[in-house]
Amino acid sequence: MDKLTKEQRHRCMSAIKGRNTKPELLVRKFLFSRGFRYRLNHPRLPGHPDLVLRKYRTVIFVNGCFWHGHDNCRYFRLPKTNIDFWQKKIERNKKRDKKEQCQLAAMGWHCITVWECQLKPKVRIQTLESLAYTLNHIFLEDRKIKTYDLPDINNTLMAAEPEVAYGRKGQQ
């Protein structure tokens, strides 16, 4: 059973922030110290990503394990009360996240999700370093010179008519 009254539970749940959370601040401070510049919660992009790096055509979502239903994570556990409500809510969140990431990918954006559990002290450095590596890799791949192979002229089919000699019929 829930130990709090309905009003107390409402007040506790409504106090949970959606922006400027501790995991988000950790990622922002690390990226800024490494020279990455970003915008916060861009209103024109689907899902209002936590961080938008236009130079890298990349958006970063910093997700809480509970609210976004991180599978196989020790920090994600459904509450014991009102199970049906929480299960539906977290499934809706997962579907919405997937839909928004598909929309962003269709617009040409790279999507990176950093989970709250990946920012715990034991694995924080490794996660943040791999994030910086990934961003640099994206930057270099997007600006790589692309070479195109020209088709072999002898083996291609021509769409036009064969070359015809012009002039009178008797002369050639």
Image (spheres, rainbow, N blue to C red):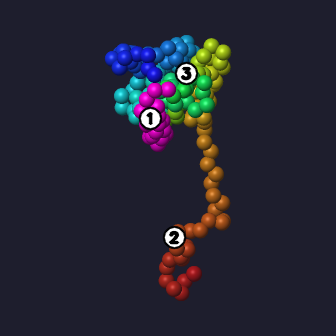
Residue 44 drawn in magenta: no
| Gap between marks 1 and 2 measured at Cα | 66 Å
Nearer to us of marks 2 and 3 is: 3
Residue 91 on image: x %, y %: 47, 36
| Gap between marks 3 and 1 measured at Cα | 24 Å
**2 or 3: tag closer to the N-terminus:** 3
Q: Is residue 22 above or below residue 76?
A: above
Say what amino acid the circle numbered 2 marks.
Ala
- Pick the front one: 124 or 88: 88
Q: Is residue 24 above or below residue 167?
A: above
Say what amino acid the circle numbered 1 marks.
Asp
- Which residue corresponds to the image point at 62% horizontal and 45% vertical from the top-left? 147
Residue 90 drawn in magenta: yes
Q: Residues within 10 Å of mark 3 (few under 14, many from 20)?
A: some
Tell me the residue that label 2 is attached to.
160
Quick one: SS at disc 3?
A: helix
Quick one: SS at disc 2?
A: loop
Magenta range: 80-107
- Which residue corresponds to the image point at 66% horizontal and 66% vertical from the top-left? 155
Instruction: In the rendered structure, find residue 84 and report the number of the disc placed on it.
Output: 1
Q: Is residue 140 above or below residue 162?
A: above
